[in-house]
Amino acid sequence: MHIQNKFYAVPGFITLFFSFVFISCSGLPVNNAPETVTEGDIQNKALKDQNILATWESKPKVVSEGNGLDMILKTSEGMNFIYAKRNEDGQQNLLYTSSHNMGDTFAKAYPINQAGISAHGENDPIIQQGPGIGMFALWQGGDSIMFSRSMNFGRSFSPEIKITDGPEKTSYNFQTMSVSPDGTIYIAWLDGRDKETNPAGTSSLYIARSFDQGKTFGANIKVAGAICPCCRPALAFGNDGQVFIAWRHVYSGDNRFIVVASSSDKGQTWSKETRVTKEGWKVNGCAHSGPAMNFTHGKLYVAWYSGANNKAALKAAVSSDNGQSFDYLGEIQGNVYDANHPDMQIIEGEPWLIFQGREPNTNNGWGSIQPWLVKIADGKPSKPEKLPFLGDSISYPSLYPGSGGRIYATWTEIGEDGPKAVLCRGRLK
């Protein structure tokens, strides 16, 4: 009897065990402690049916702790990332990692830099694809703009080299980098070497170029002075070898305009700047928000942030004559609050923009900052669409068109436990 009782007790335990497994796997409720539901979880559930531009995975991927995530996307959908992360001593390093399964998993990261780096906001690092297998990384290191390249599919990066050739004790920051269709590397940054000739509180805009895939760079070339000192410039390329550069210029009376200049000799000389709009933004201070720019089908598009008239707005303009004049397209943020930091990419021949902002109907407009997507078609912006996020406020989103109808976004998401480098994957509708 004792043995029988023990024998009959076993099936009861097994039945209970498999019932628990069945209920858990089937998605039926189990009487466990409730999971924490974030603001991101609530909003993400409603996005699939609402969005008309793209659908996104319901929960973005955390690539790593850190900030300033930037990515190269290969035709094969292989991913190469750089981002900044603090070590145990609190110093930032520039790390490289990759993914060969579209972001399901990530390789062990390793540092690119030898000396310290500074990565924050618009001063984040940049990675760009060159001709062939070359990959180029750019960042602020100490008092200089630093560059490194990989010519072996990311297995290693070369020792960093200094791009700036001005005095050591001055500011070089808010860098950007683009590779032209002919393979020339263009690097632009804000430069403090001309304090004696610039208006107080402004910087100069300089560039450097490489014609040998980053092995060497030529002398620094000044583009303009009187630049808003914390707004990163933007680069773009035309159909006939033109190089365009955009920045926020400071005119008399602290009137700040987004302007564009062009070069027809690979950046050796530059045209006088053209104002993108008739009205500027009078503000005694720097917005820490540079323009976004891209070129498609003979048209140069520019988008930027303005706080004029007591309103945080993202504005856009287009030029059909290679930057000699611009037509204002209006605001693109819709009813999104605190819209800022646009990034522009060309998808199927049209400009798409990702930016950050707050949902107007959440907490009276004071919910977490989240990513939004807009497409400009026939000169008209679409209604902004929300992307999924993890629930904490995001900053400095970037957009990456993939192949096969795929699309990707990255940003920094900052919570109580620090910043996270986040990847979100989507599909065009």
Image (cartoon, grey):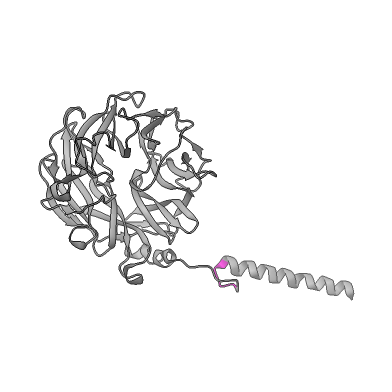
Is 364 above or below relative to 62?
below
Residue 386 screen position, x and y as percent:
33, 60
Q: Quadrant of residue 297?
A: top left
Most foreground residue, 135 or 262 = 262
Instruction: Tell me which residue sits at (31%, 27%) in the image.
Output: 165
Q: Quadrant of residue 240?
A: top left
Q: Quadrant of residue 57?
A: bottom left
Where are the magenta residues, as a range?
A: 26-30
Left or right position of 187 against 94: left
Q: Quadrant of the C terminus?
A: bottom left
Residue projecting furthest to the right: 1
What is the magenta segment's predominant secondary structure? loop
Left or right position of 363 against 327: right
Is 121 magenta? The answer is no
Residue 414 is at least partly visible in this image? yes
Residue 184 is at least partly visible in this image? no
Is 373 above or below relative to 75?
below
Q: Quadrant of the N terminus?
A: bottom right
Residue 141 screen position, x and y as percent:
40, 36
Most foreground residue, 382 or 35 = 35
Left or right position of 174 against 243: right
Residue 11 screen position, x and y as percent:
75, 70
Instruction: Tell me which residue sits at (34%, 48%) in the image.
Output: 398
Residue 394 screen position, x and y as percent:
38, 56
